[in-house]
Image: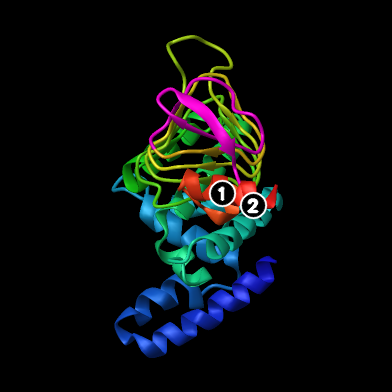
Amino acid sequence: MRNHIWQQLHSKALELVNKEPLLASHVYASVLSHQCLGSALSFVIANKLSDPVVPAITIRELFDQAFAADDQLMTQVAHDMQVIVERDPAAGSYLNVLLHLKGFHAVQTHRLAHWLWQHQRQELAQFIQSRCSEVFAVDIHPACRIGHGLMLDHATGIVIGETAEIGNNVSIMQGVTLGGTGNQQGDRHPKIRSGVMIGAGAKILGNIEIAEQARIGAGSVVLASVPAHTTAVGIPAKIIGGSGNSPAQSMEQNFLTASKAEDASG
């Protein structure tokens, strides 16, 4: 998959250079001068995360170390890119995802921070987390475990706590919080299972489970676990029906539309 994505991305980059010469130097530096997806990705994100004290080359070396040590990271990158192009009609191309979509950038930055955290480099992981929050307006604790195929749409204002877990193929809109309910210690954040879609501005609080293929309506405050294949909306959130087919894939935030689709299929 990653080779296919790289070939598509590289071809699109060549087209862009011809179409928009003003971006030629940017595209050459970010894509065409690299030999693989990992190299281009580390260059792009490192230059966004760098500050006057920690230069881009230092951050890029960290990405390259992580990619070399754990091949699964690049598999996750490829899945993340693929689902964004599939789910987001505004994404356009893999090239646009790589160069411009900060939700994608934030997820890959977290993957680096999590890798550092797992290798007992917590202070460095927290620095990367801090830069991610400042640059992308997305704050994900480095200890949080995230599966593949995660899409953060628009991404601004997303906060995810230390003991949260996110499964595979999940879609999360802007302004979402996966937080705790107080200053208690231990396992205190939500568990988001595979296939879930969380609408814009939703707050999911406490050590609760949002089960497989559930849908959380925009602006909802969720304080109790949500069963699989259901839709929860409101403050506090209540179950109002089914979630339709593949909510993370469809990205449908209108729960009335989703409920009708569920009724029709059931």
| Secondary structure state at the residue bearing disc 1 | helix
Vertical side of 182 occupied by 216: above or below: below
Residue denoted by label 1: 260
Q: Is residue 109 visible?
A: no
Which of these two is toward me, 57 or 213? 213
Let me know if residue 222 is in the magenta part: yes
Specify the label residue 88 is tagged with.
none
Which of these two is toward me, 132 or 207? 207
Vertical side of 239 occupied by 10: above or below: below
Amino acid at the residue labelled 1: Lys
Vertical side of 148 occupied by 27: above or below: below
The x, y position of residue 138, in whole percent, is: 39, 41
Residue bounds of the magenta highlight: 219-246
Residue denoted by label 2: 264
Q: Is residue 202 left or right of residue 111?
A: left
Q: Is residue 165 left or right of residue 141?
A: right
| Secondary structure state at the residue bearing disc 2 | helix
Residue 4: quarter of image:
bottom right
Residue at 48 percent of width and 9 percent of height = 184
Residue 194: quarter of image:
top right
Q: Is residue 6 visible?
A: yes
Residue at 56 percent of width and 19 percent of height = 207
Residue at 40 percent of width and 90 percent of height = 18
Vertical side of 4 occupied by 85: above or below: above
The x, y position of residue 199, in whole percent, is: 45, 42
Image marks 1 and 2: residues in contact by CB distance under 8 Å: yes
Amino acid at the residue labelled 2: Ala
